[in-house]
Image: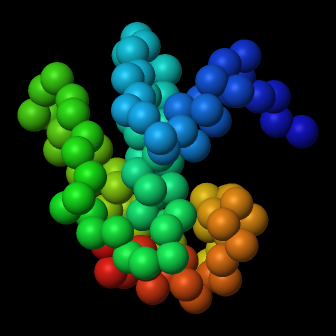
Amino acid sequence: MSMLPLDHEDRVRATMTFNRNVVVTAGAGTGKTTLLINRLLHLLMREPGALPVTAIVALTFTQKSAHEMLSRLREALEKLTADETSETAVDLMNTYSLEKSIIATRAAAA
């Protein structure tokens, strides 16, 4: 059984809050990029109609961070289009009552 981080509820809230902007500040290596990628995936999957990835703004302080975010988002979307069912895919399926094929289609469109 895995232990949840102490700030798990804050991470979930930052991932799932869509009615306002969210600012994430934390030290290096604490999971900011992972949290932001999860938030972007939820934004792309939660609406019945496809949300174009170009409609999302995600700011970072450096070009290196921006490239890392883009790379990780691309990798996450590619995993969602694959046949295997990842933990992220299961989370999205459960959260939004979507079938894997719908998630794969939306990920491919993004």
Instruction: Please tell me in which quadrant of the rendered image residue 29 appears.
Output: top left
Identity of the residue drawn at 45% across and 85% down: 105
Percent x, y of residue 31: 48, 28
Q: Which residue occupies the extreme right position in the image?
A: 1
Percent x, y of residue 84: 62, 78
Placement of 31 over or under 43, stated as above or below:
above
Identity of the residue drawn at 41% across and 22% down: 24
Percent x, y of residue 47: 49, 68
Q: Can residue 30 be seen in this view?
A: yes
Q: Which residue occupies the extreme front position in the image?
A: 19
Q: Can residue 68 be seen in this view?
A: no
Placement of 49 over or under 88, stated as above or below:
below
Placement of 82 over or under 55, stated as above or below:
below
Count of numbered marks:
0
Identity of the residue drawn at 66% across and 77% down: 98
Q: Quadrant of the N terminus?
A: top right
Placement of 9 over or under 51, stated as above or below:
above
Percent x, y of residue 8: 69, 27
Residue in the foreground of this view, choosing between 91 and 84: 91
Q: In which quarter of the image is the C terminus?
A: bottom left
Q: In this view, does 57 lie to the left or right of 79?
A: left
